[in-house]
Image: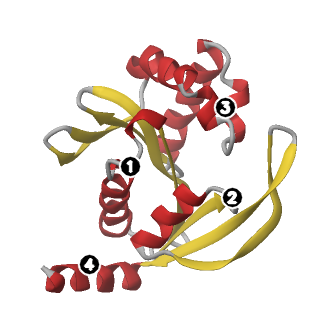
Amino acid sequence: MNIVIASDLHLALTDKSQLEELFMTIQENRDHLIQYLSWVEGMTSLEPLAAYIDQCDYNYWAGTDISFVIVYQEKIVGRIGLHYINRHNRNGAIGYWLKKSVEGKGIISACCKKLIDYAFEKVGLERLELKAAVQNQRSRSVAERMGFQQEGIMRNAEIVNGTFNDLVLYAMLKEDWEQARRDEIHAI
């Protein structure tokens, strides 16, 4: 599955054919990513990443996760996905990361918009959550630009590099997203 965002930007469902390029992207951005992402520490070879991709595939078929690589100018530059999908309660979470060299180009914002549309229109979710470390201002800014509402601070919610991080919990309801999209159209 591919989701086209622009002529030089699309999302591709994560699969084993991307293993080596995805691993190199992580390795080249290890210092950048390890600040906020606990899983980076364990990605020291192809084997754990291959196991993770297998788990992504299993979760996709189980209906609990939809994981994409972000492809910009024909190169993998990050990942984005819908996680912890709960079909009964119609909610899930959105998560993403991007390599440092392409930050500030609007890539994550464009990918988030498309994935939020997909979550509400195709998956049928009613609520999306996004969590970001309190000190991760770039990620928090994305959430706020998208219109996610801050619901609270989750104290000592995640261990990264042996240190507990507080996470800001943001949420978006389908009705809020629909209103934001209508407002965006009227502003044009």
Residue under the point 72% across and 63% down: 167
Q: CA distance from mark 4 to mark 3?
A: 34 Å
Mark number for residue 104? 1
Q: Is residue 85 visible?
A: no
Name the quadrant of the N terminus: top left
Q: How is the image coloured?
A: secondary structure
Which quadrant would residue 168 be assigned to in this image? Answer: bottom right
Asked if residue 76 lies left or right of residue 140, the reply is left
Q: Nearer the viewer, residue 183 or 2?
A: 183
Asked if residue 11 lies left or right of residue 22, the reply is left
Residue 117 % position (x, y): 31, 65
Q: Nearer the N terminus, badge 4 or badge 3?
A: 3
Q: Verify CB contact (< 8 Å) between mark 2 and mark 3.
A: no
Q: Which residue does the numbered mark 3 point to in the structure image? A: 40
Residue 161 % position (x, y): 81, 37
Q: Which residue does the numbered mark 4 point to in the structure image? A: 181
- Asked if residue 152 is positioned above or below residue 58 in the image, the reply reads below
Secondary structure beneath label 4: helix
Q: Amino acid at mark 3?
A: Val
Crowdedness near tag 4: few (<14), some (14–19) or many (≥20) residues, C-alpha within 10 Å? some
Q: Which residue does the numbered mark 2 point to in the structure image? A: 135
Q: Nearer the N terminus, badge 1 or badge 4?
A: 1
Of tags 2 and 3, which is closer to the observer? 2
Asked if residue 49 lies left or right of residue 152, the reply is left
Secondary structure beneath label 1: loop
Q: Verify CB contact (< 8 Å) between mark 4 and mark 2.
A: no
Residue 52 % position (x, y): 59, 29
Q: CA distance from mark 4 to mark 2?
A: 29 Å
